[in-house]
Amino acid sequence: MSRAQKEYLDFSLKILNDFSAKAQPEVLLELISEKICNKNSSLFFKKLDKLKFIGVNNAEFSKSVITAENNSDDFSEFDSLIHSLMPWRKGPFKFNSLFLDSEWQCQLKWDRLSKKTVFKNKTVLDVGSGNGYYLYRLLGAGAKFGLGLDPHLLYFHQNLALNAFFQPSKLHLMPLGWESCDKFRPVFDVVMCMGVLYHQKDPELLLSHLKTPLKKSGELLLETLIINNNTDTMLIPESRYAAMKNVYNIPSKKRLIKWLLSTGYRNIEILDITQTQTVEQRQTSFSSGMSLIDFLDPKDLSKTIEGHPRPLRILLKASI
C-alpha cells in the first residue's frame, strides 16, 4: 500500500468515526479499501506519491473559479496528471497558470443555490458529489465541514488530485454511493443531492436514504430534472434522454413533491427552476467531444435529439 493510500484510509477512518453509526466505520472503511486498492486506483495513488508540492498560497474557494498557487519547482507532473483525468465535467479550477475549463460551469448552479441557503458553520453531506467542486464552494461559504460521496472512480481520482493541490483541511470525498447513507448518524445540518435522482430506478428509495444522515433541524437540498407539466405525471424515456442512457424517470413538479411527501419530507420550498443553457453546459478542451448543443434537436432546440422536452432543472429544499 502506498503512502498516499494509507494517509487516505487513516483520514477516512477518522471521519467515519465522527459521522457514521455505531459499528459502521469498519464496514464502510472496507468498502472504501476495495475501491482504492484496485489496480486502477493503486496506480493513481502511486502518481500522487510522486507529487511534491510545497505549501499553498492565495487559495480562493469563494469565487466562481476555485483557485490557488503553490511553490512547486516542477509543475509538469501535476499538469500531466490533470490532463490524464479527462473528461472534467465539474469546475472551473485554476492551478497556478493552468486554467481547467470544465464542461459544466458549476458556478451558475452554485449561484442559484447559495443565494437562498446559508452554509456558514454547517456540516454538509454532498451525495453524488462528482469531483467535489461544490465541497470547495461550501468551504468558501463558511461551512464547518463538507463530506462528499461519489462511487465513480474517475471523479474520486479527480478530487484526490484537486486536494493534492489545494490542500483543504475541512472537506473529504469517499468513493461510496447513496446506498451508504443509511450507515451514517443524523449529524448533518444539510444534505445536498444534485443531478442524481433521475439516474435511479427507485427515486423514493434514494429520497428515503437521504433522510438518515440529516438532523431533525436540518434540510435537504435537492436538484433534479423535471418536465414542464402541471399534472401528476412523469416522463420515462424508452432508451436515452439527451444522449444519456441511464435516465429512468423525469417527474413533473407535482409528482416530485408527491415523492418527497410520501418519503417523510415537509416544508418543501422551490428555490429555482431553470432550463439548462449552452453557456452552462458546453464542450471545452478538458471535456469530452460532445455536450448539450449536440444533444438537442438542431431543428427545434426546445427538444432533445430523442424528441423529449429540453432539460429543465428544479432546485428545492425540504425538512424532515
Image (cartoon, rainbow, N blue to C red):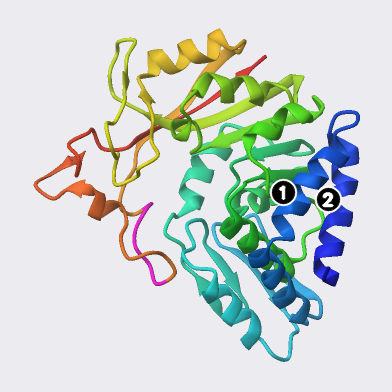
C-alpha gap between disc 2 and disc 1: 8 Å
Query: Of 98 and 18, which appears nearest the observer?
Result: 18
Q: Is residue 190 above or below residue 283?
A: above
Residue tagged 2: 12
Q: Is residue 304 above or below residue 165?
A: above
Q: Is residue 307 above or below residue 211?
A: below
Quarter occupied by the N terminus:
bottom right
Q: Which mark is residue 174?
A: 1
Question: What residue lies at 40% left-to-right and 39% top-to-bottom?
Answer: 246
Going by the numbered disc 2, the residue's amino acid type is Ser
Disc 1 secondary structure class? strand
Residue 115 falls left or right of residue 29? left
Question: What residue lies at 38% left-to-right and 35% top-to-bottom?
Answer: 247
Going by the numbered disc 1, the residue's amino acid type is Met
Q: Position of residue 263 (x, y in %)?
A: 58, 12
Find residue 166 and report its image quarter: bottom right
Residue 58 falls left or right of residue 317? right
- Which sits earlier in the primary sequence, circle 2 or circle 1? 2
Q: Are marks 2 and 1 in contact (CB under 8 Å)?
A: yes
Tally the marks.
2
* Residue 271 visible to an observer of this rendering: yes
Q: Is residue 200 magenta?
A: no
Q: Position of residue 129 (x, y in %)?
A: 60, 46
Q: Position of residue 10 (x, y in %)?
A: 89, 56
Disc 2 secondary structure class? helix
Look at the magenta stretch and give its main secondary structure.
Answer: loop
In the rendered structure, which segment of residues is drawn in magenta? 280-285
Few, some or many C-alpha atoms within 10 Å of disc 2 (few <14, some 14-19, many ≥20)?
Answer: many
Q: Which mark is residue 3?
A: none
* Residue 63 visible to an observer of this rendering: no
Query: Of 285 and 205, which appears nearest the observer?
Result: 205
Residue 57 falls left or right of residue 281? right
